[in-house]
Image: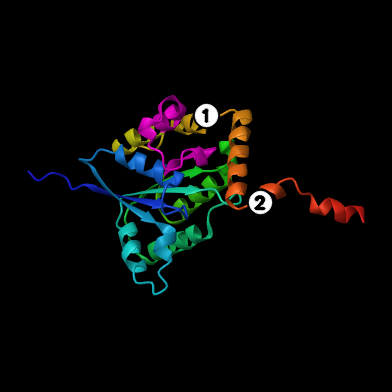
Amino acid sequence: MNPCPKKRVSLLVGSPKRKNSASATLGLYLCNQLDSQKFDYQEIHLRSALSDKQNINVSYWLNDILKSDVLIFSSPLYVDCLPSYVFQVFEKIYQERKKTRDPKEIQFLAIINSGFPESSQSQTALDICQHFAGESGMLWLGGLLLGAGFIVGGRDIRKMGWLFKNIKKSLDLSAAAINHGKVIPVEAFHIMGKPFLSKKLFCWIGNIGFKQMAKRNGTVRQLYDRPYEKEQMI
């Protein structure tokens, strides 16, 4: 008796970063928690895929996406929304599926992280993902929202201990649901949304990072400049 073929999972990374992005870190952890006897996954960085000016690779990765059984989309929040190139990819997927008479059944899951301490800042972006899945005829598995995602960076979630315990638990619950062909439980959404830093600590860490950035760019002495105040006094 032949074993059932493995299902194909495509991790769509929406971050412009090629390395150490929180989006890739979260998505890859989830993919690695899937049952390896049931699933094979591939990682596609959307900005890199669209950067080919000759479009040599566009049909290749688009074809891979359309043949997937599960799409895991992981992206940062940009101005309360998604990066522009993400919409380009969504449009291509939508158009191709609409042209197909009987498109393949695909499950879609989204993970949105932001630099804000409150995960709720990303709700609009998640709603867009859900709308896209519905309009494209895909099964919406649910979504996860993470605040202060920049702290995750390219770190190994498995080795971060108590600080990332809620992130790990949420992704583990999501992977278990996918393994059993179910939608993401509401519990996973709420656990991921819990802030793992107080706002006071978040601001303290943010200020340190801001000053380090200013130092690298040689603008430390300009941090407290108020040029517009002088214009208003004239």
Dot label at residue 219? 2
Residue underneath mark 1: 196
**Callout 2 crowding tier (Cα within 10 Å): few <14, some 14–19, many ≥20:** few
Q: Residue at x 57, y 50 (%)?
A: 216
Res 177 quadrant in image:
top left
Q: Is residue 153 magenta?
A: yes
What's the amino acid at mark 1? Phe
Residue at image position (33%, 38%) is 178
Name the element at disc 1: loop
Q: Position of residue 83 (x, y in %)?
A: 53, 56
- The residue located at (13%, 44%) in the rendering is 3
Which quarter shows the N terminus? top left
Q: Looking at the picture, tell me which residue is in the foreground, 73 or 186.
A: 73
Under mark 2, the amino acid is: Thr
Which residue reaches farthest bottom? 54
Magenta span of residues: 141-170
